């Protein structure tokens, strides 16, 4: 603010207000700078309110990313080698990072949440991150860098399970055998906790119960920041026109010590609906450098009529502290949906959002 107005920083006074969650969006201080410029121009205090089109067309976005994965199986069908490369862009809403920061491996690990912290037991694992300049202004949204990475990883794990003829739930549980604790970068992943949430969603969702024609179940899981363990089973149906309907989501979460059970359930439910919106329609497109969407009339989000039955099972933990539940529910829900679509149609989806044209009979 001082730099913008050309005044000493000591002359800037910040009033910290108590408001609802803004989370990562607050890191983009464009709204504050805009208010200061307008206030200086009119020589009076101002309150700046962005309209929905202002926010949707001139805010910042979730950066796109691309993933390349490969797996090697031995003659017995065992997964012995895993490679996952993510290509994406760091947030560009702030000033560029210093050379010292971008030479630090930990910096790229943060950018590849869901890639380098793979929880499965595989003898050889190679992961990497490739930076790509994305000119679109983008920054943190819910779950930051993890959703696209976990979508790629959990979709591909499902693909490998299908190629070996093994049930997707059983395949994940098999890959979690062995050492209970694994270190990934600075994280310590507890496979016992991940096995537990998978076993619970398998039981509570009636995983092995046959589905009607046109229906399928999908599963996915994730360990968020080495702390919160989440697993989903999703039931979908796909009609001849390629329309996808999510009927039921069974969730299990181990987030350490639970202080407010209702609050945890609400966070999981909202994370599911967030993922449902991004999987089945949410998309920002550009034409001649301009965002084409401006309101929720042309940017579809899940509404009451789209909301499935949601069952949240809170897993008792031996941890003595609570972990996060705001971001962790988001990453596994989209691959659980697309894995269910594969079970229903035999079509493996590798890009988002889901398009009816790809699923029409």
Image: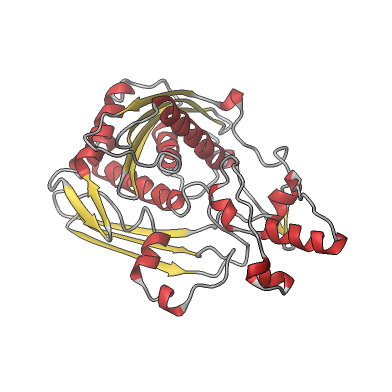
Residue shown at the point (70%, 50%) measured from the top left: 55
The quarter of the rendered structure image containing the N terminus is bottom right
What percent of the width, then of the height, locates residue 243? Answer: 57, 31
**74 in relation to 164, above or below:** below
The colour scheme used to paint the residues is secondary structure
**41 in relation to 262, above or below:** below
What percent of the width, then of the height, locates residue 345? Answer: 44, 34
User: In the image, is 40 to the left or to the right of 79?
Assistant: right
What percent of the width, then of the height, locates residue 115? Answer: 35, 56
User: In the image, is 272 to the left or to the right of 230?
Assistant: right
User: In the image, is 235 to the left or to the right of 256?
Assistant: right
Res. 13 visible in picture: yes
**247 in relation to 22, above or below:** above
Frontmost residue, 46 versus 105: 46
The number of discs equals 0
Quadrant in the rendering for residue 130: bottom left
Res. 165 visible in picture: no
Frontmost residue, 96 versus 74: 96
Residue shown at the point (63%, 59%) measured from the top left: 29
Which residue sits furthest bottom? 99
Frontmost residue, 31 versus 129: 31
Residue shown at the point (30%, 49%) measured from the top left: 226
Which residue sits furthest right? 42
Residue shown at the point (29%, 39%) measured from the top left: 321
What percent of the width, then of the height, locates residue 3? Answer: 67, 73
């Amino acid at each position: 603010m001082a730099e913008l107005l050309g005044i000493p920083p000591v002359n800037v006074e910040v009033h910290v207000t108590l408001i609802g969650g803004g989370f990562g969006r607050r890191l983009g201080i464009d709204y504050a700078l805009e208010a200061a410029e307008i206030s200086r121009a009119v020589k009076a205090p101002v309150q700046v309110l962005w309209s929905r089109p202002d926010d949707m067309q001139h805010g910042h976005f979730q950066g796109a990313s691309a993933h390349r994965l490969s797996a090697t199986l031995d003659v017995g069908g065992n997964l012995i080698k895993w490679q996952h490369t993510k290509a994406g862009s760091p947030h560009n809403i702030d000033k560029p990072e210093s050379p010292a920061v971008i030479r630090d491996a930990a910096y790229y690990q943060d950018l590849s949440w869901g890639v380098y912290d793979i929880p499965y037991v595989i003898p050889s694992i190679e992961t990497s991150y490739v930076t790509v300049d994305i000119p679109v202004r983008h920054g943190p949204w819910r779950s930051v860098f993890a959703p696209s990475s976990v979508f790629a990883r959990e979709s591909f794990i499902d693909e490998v399970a299908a190629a070996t003829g093994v049930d997707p739930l059983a395949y994940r549980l098999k890959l979690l055998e062995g050492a209970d604790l694994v270190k990934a970068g600075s994280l310590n992943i507890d496979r016992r906790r991940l096995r537990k949430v998978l076993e619970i969603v398998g039981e509570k969702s009636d995983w092995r119960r046959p589905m009607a024609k046109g229906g399928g179940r999908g599963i996915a899981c994730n360990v968020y920041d080495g702390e919160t363990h989440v697993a989903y089973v999703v039931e979908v149906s796909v009609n001849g026109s390629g329309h996808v309907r999510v009927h039921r989501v069974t969730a299990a979460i181990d987030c350490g010590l639970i202080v407010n059970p209702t609050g945890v359930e609400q966070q999981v439910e909202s994370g599911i609906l967030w993922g449902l919106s991004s999987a089945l329609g949410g998309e920002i497109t550009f034409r001649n450098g301009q965002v084409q969407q401006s309101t929720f009339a042309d940017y579809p989000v899940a509404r009451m009529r789209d909301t499935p039955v949601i069952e949240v099972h809170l897993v008792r933990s031996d941890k003595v502290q609570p972990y996060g539940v705001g971001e962790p529910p988001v990453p596994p829900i989209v691959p659980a949906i697309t894995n269910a679509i594969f079970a229903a149609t035999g079509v493996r989806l590798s890009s988002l959002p889901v398009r009816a044209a790809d699923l029409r009979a």
